[in-house]
Image (spheres, rainbow, N blue to C red):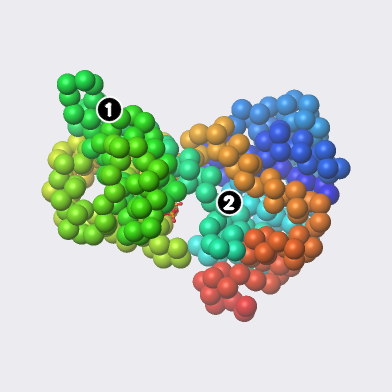
Amino acid sequence: MIIGIPKEIKNNENRVALTPAGAQELVKRGHTVYVQHTAGDGSGFPDHVYEEAGAKILPTIEETYRIADMIMKVKEPIEPEYDLVREDQLLFTYFHFASHEPLTNAMIKSKSVCLAYETVEKPGGGLPLLVPMSEVAGRMATQKGANYLEKPLGGKGILMGGVPGTLPAKVLILGGGIVGTQAAWMAAGMKADVTILDVSLPRMRYLSDVMPANVKTRMSNEYNIRELIKTADLIIGAVLIPGAKAPHLITRDMLKEMQPGTVLVDVAVDQGGCIETCKPTTHQDPTFTIDGVLHYCVANMPGAVPYTSTIALTNATLPYAIQLADKGWKKASKENVELATGLNVIKGDVVYKAVADAFDLPF
Ligand code: NAD
């Protein structure tokens, strides 16, 4: 199969869909990989590294779309790309169709086959192509929070782990899933005093089995939240209710209960946020302050660490890309139910119910 890797053109997107190592694996299996000139630069992979791995470089995005049977991307195609997508072409990328009607209509019109990373689903539940970005965002949440706790940046002026003779920072994590667990590992490693709140007892049992002694778990309810926010230094929002907006566990009035310089990092901001006062911010202008409480709510945190994110994403997508390249999308999705759940649009028809429902389209 011919696989095309265009350069991402969405504002400030430095990731690329395939590492040189991933390209080599596909080439080894007899496939041809075309990478658009400079597509990997933002992630630290210049053209010559792809060429050494067996890929070919194409000068323009137009040529990359024209030649490829399968386009692999990171972000959904944006408007200038809509007309480049060809009939019968397979697109394997994040789409998030349900929140984007013009994109959905454009892909229907293109008569391409759209397989969305975010809906590839394990039979028992679990979204393997979302996990790596949650891992990155979780680890980064603690890193960012630790930084913003510094006084000149608006925080309380407390060091995460303290030093002998002082108390460590109190870190409160709302939601102990992928993001929350990774955030907790980082905070625990920095010797902070960490509390994870969740509603799932089995999850909290698991966490208390695997986490070190400086990580405690508490049931997530308003009573406990109101008590814990009074002394927390860093609060990380990491709640997810699949298919629904995040619940506002911290409401506007609760900010008054917090100490000035408390730092809030709401990773769940992409699902509406679990802190009422959070609104999406950007890497250029990441924070704002309300009632003396600093808010960090960047909606695409992994975009700031493209080297790590690109490798983590390829690690997860490559096994699926290999199946699609070896067998074609029809056979691959017949044999692997995870790929079948990833199919959202097939040659003009919406085949994923939530997307059809979102825009009243036939299903
Ligand atoms: P996950 O499903 O692994 O974990 C969510 C956890 O929240 C679960 O353990 C669940 O039991 C818990 N939960 C549900 N209701 C709760 C409540 N009322 N109180 C406390 N806990 C509750 O999800 P995840 O992969 O960790 O993702 C978390 C959020 O981070 C999602 O909104 C996701 O979209 C977002 N995210 C954001 C970025 C970013 O760049 N901002 C990147 C990746 C993920």
Q: How many marks?
A: 2
Describe the element under mark 1 as helix, strand or loop.
loop
Give the vertical position of 98 relative to 53 (above or below).
below
Badge 2 vs badge 1, beta-carbon distance below 8 Å: no
Q: Is 16 placed left or right of 47 in the picture?
A: left
Residue 160, horizontal then vertical, whole percent: 28, 29
Splitting the image into 4 quarters, where does residue 8 fall?
Answer: top right
Confirm if mark 1 falls within 8 A of ligand 1: no
Residue nearer the viewer, 323 or 56: 323
Residue 264, horizontal then vertical, whole percent: 28, 43
Q: Amino acid at mark 1?
A: Gly
Residue nearer the viewer, 284 or 173: 173
Q: Is residue 249 visible?
A: yes
The crowding category of the residue bearing disc 2, from other C-alpha atoms within 10 Å (few below 14, some 14 to 19, many at least 20), is many
Splitting the image into 4 quarters, where does residue 355 fall?
Answer: bottom right
Name the residue that disc number 2 marks: 129
Q: Is residue 272 visible?
A: no
The crowding category of the residue bearing disc 1, from other C-alpha atoms within 10 Å (few below 14, some 14 to 19, many at least 20), is some
Residue 299, horizontal then vertical, whole percent: 43, 47
Q: What residue lies at 75% left-to-right and 45% top-to-bottom?
A: 4
Q: What residue lies at 50% left-to-right and 62% top-to-bottom?
A: 99
Name the residue that disc number 1 marks: 161
Q: Is 70 placed left or right of 180 in the picture?
A: right
